[in-house]
Amino acid sequence: MKLGAYTACLHDKPVAEALRILRDLGLDSAEITPNWIVSSWPPETGEILAWQWREQLIPYWRELASLATDNGVARLCVELHCNQLVYNIPSLSRLRL
């Protein structure tokens, strides 16, 4: 399954709206869990995985973190779940860089 631009847009807009609602409600944190479906096998998917981190995940979370800050939200939660880009402590640490 490939996350296309249209599908990504369907998930991104509700997340952005949720951050604005948190601001309006006077809350400073939320639990948001987008799905990033990945597989490290077969080996040729390594290039795709690197591209997803470099071109999709890092830019997306930087923008989302900025939007959260702009709306007074201090913390975002990530559900660590297998088959997603952020699924364990090392991948979470990589996201925080």
Image (spheres, rainbow, N blue to C red):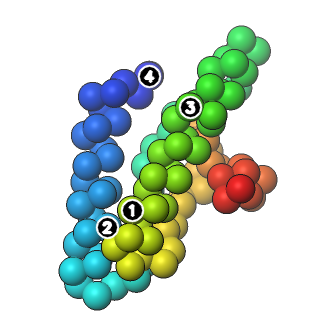
Residue ID for mark 1 = 67
CB contact under 8 Å: marks 1 and 2? yes
Q: In this view, does 57 lie to the left or right of 93?
A: left
User: Where in the figure is residue 32, as x and y percent of width and height?
Assistant: 41, 61
Secondary structure at badge 3 equals helix
Residue at 31% across, 44% down: 11
Residue ID for mark 4 = 2
N-term mark: 4 or 2: 4
N-term mark: 1 or 2: 2
Label 1 crowding class (10 Å Cα cut-off): few <14, some 14-19, many 20+?
A: some
Residue type, mark 1 in image: Leu
Residue 39, visible in the rendered structure: no
Label 3 crowding class (10 Å Cα cut-off): few <14, some 14-19, many 20+?
A: few
N-term mark: 1 or 3: 3
Residue at 28% across, 38% down: 9
Secondary structure at badge 1 equals helix
Residue ID for mark 3 = 55
N-term mark: 3 or 4: 4
Residue ID for mark 2 = 19
Q: In this view, does 20 lie to the left or right of 76?
A: left
Query: Which quadrant does the C terminus fall into?
Result: bottom right
- Mark 4 vs mark 1: in front: 1
Secondary structure at badge 2 equals helix
Foreground residue, 63 or 3? Answer: 63
Residue at 44% across, 71% down: 69
CB contact under 8 Å: marks 4 and 1? no
Residue type, mark 4 in image: Lys
Residue type, mark 3 in image: Glu
| Total tally of numbered discs in the picture | 4
- Mark 1 vs mark 2: in front: 1
What distance separates the C-alpha of mark 4 from that of mark 1?
A: 26 Å
What distance separates the C-alpha of mark 1 from that of mark 2?
A: 8 Å
